[in-house]
Image (cartoon, grey):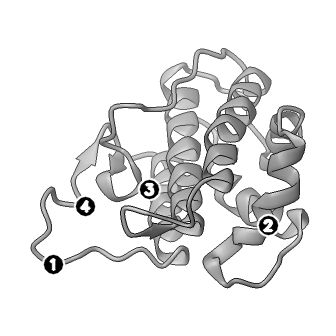
Amino acid sequence: MTHRLWGAAAASVLACLAAGCGLGFGASPDPMEVCDGVTRSVGGCDSDQPTFAGQSCDAVAEEFGRQLDARLVPILAGNDVVDGEHKSVRMAHFQALLVTRANLHLQTAGIDLRCPAEAFLGVAERHFSDDLRSKAGTYLFGTGEPRAYEDWRADLLRTLSAVEDEVD
């Protein structure tokens, strides 16, 4: 398995742990089931998967930014708890899923250029709405403490470090 895939897998697991998601015993279906490289627990087996078509780091980053905004803004505007998961958990799950899917696309598309996470996020941010910028930090880690956009951004940047690995 390449460094990139290990990074993506680690990002998925870390996001789930950071968000405090539980893995209920005896639950069905198995939250650790893996679908196309991503665990069910972070949405890897859901029917509505993020997709990418870009053929450069910047193009994938633009798609990433649009999809992140389109999925997180409704979470931020919606109920605090849905299916037993708080907003912070649902946000972390989608972020991990989106980073992993972007990463897998970069690899399978053969994009051999390095994708520095900071530059990738800079391009993606061009597509973040004011709603996302003003509210995302509020639900970071589910602590209930108001957090700044910059705190949320820094957390997302750590997850995005998976895109920095070159394709082996």
Residue drawn at 54 percent across, 53 percent down: 96
Residue identified by numbered label 1 = 25
The residue that disc 3 covers is 9
Q: Residues within 10 Å of mark 2 (few under 14, many from 20)?
A: many
Residue at image coords 57%, 22% = 52
For residue 56, side relative to residue 14 (left or right):
right
**In this picture, residue 108 sits left or right of residue 37:** right
Q: Is residue 167 placed above or below 108 in the rendered structure?
A: below
Residue 46 against residue 156 in the figure, above or below: above
Q: Nearer the viewer, residue 145 or 15?
A: 145
Nearest to N terminus: mark 1 or mark 4: 1
The kind of residue tagged 4 is Pro
Q: Amino acid at mark 2?
A: Gly
Looking at the rendered structure, the kind of residue marked 3 is Ala
User: Label 4: which residue?
Assistant: 31
- Mark 3 and mark 4 lie on one chain; the one further toward the N terminus is 3
Give the crowd class for mark 3: few <14, some 14-19, many >=20 residues within 10 Å: some
Is residue 81 depicted above or below 9 in this figure?
A: below
Distance from Cα at disc 3 to Cα at disc 1 = 22 Å
Q: Can residue 163 be spotted in the picture?
A: no
Across and down, in percent, residue 91 comes to 59, 57
Q: CA distance from mark 3 to mark 4?
A: 14 Å
Who's the residue at 83% across and 32% down the image?
127
Q: CA distance from mark 1 to mark 4?
A: 10 Å
Q: CA distance from mark 2 to mark 3?
A: 24 Å
Instruction: Determine which quarter of the picture holds residue 82.
Output: bottom left
Q: CA distance from mark 2 to mark 4?
A: 27 Å
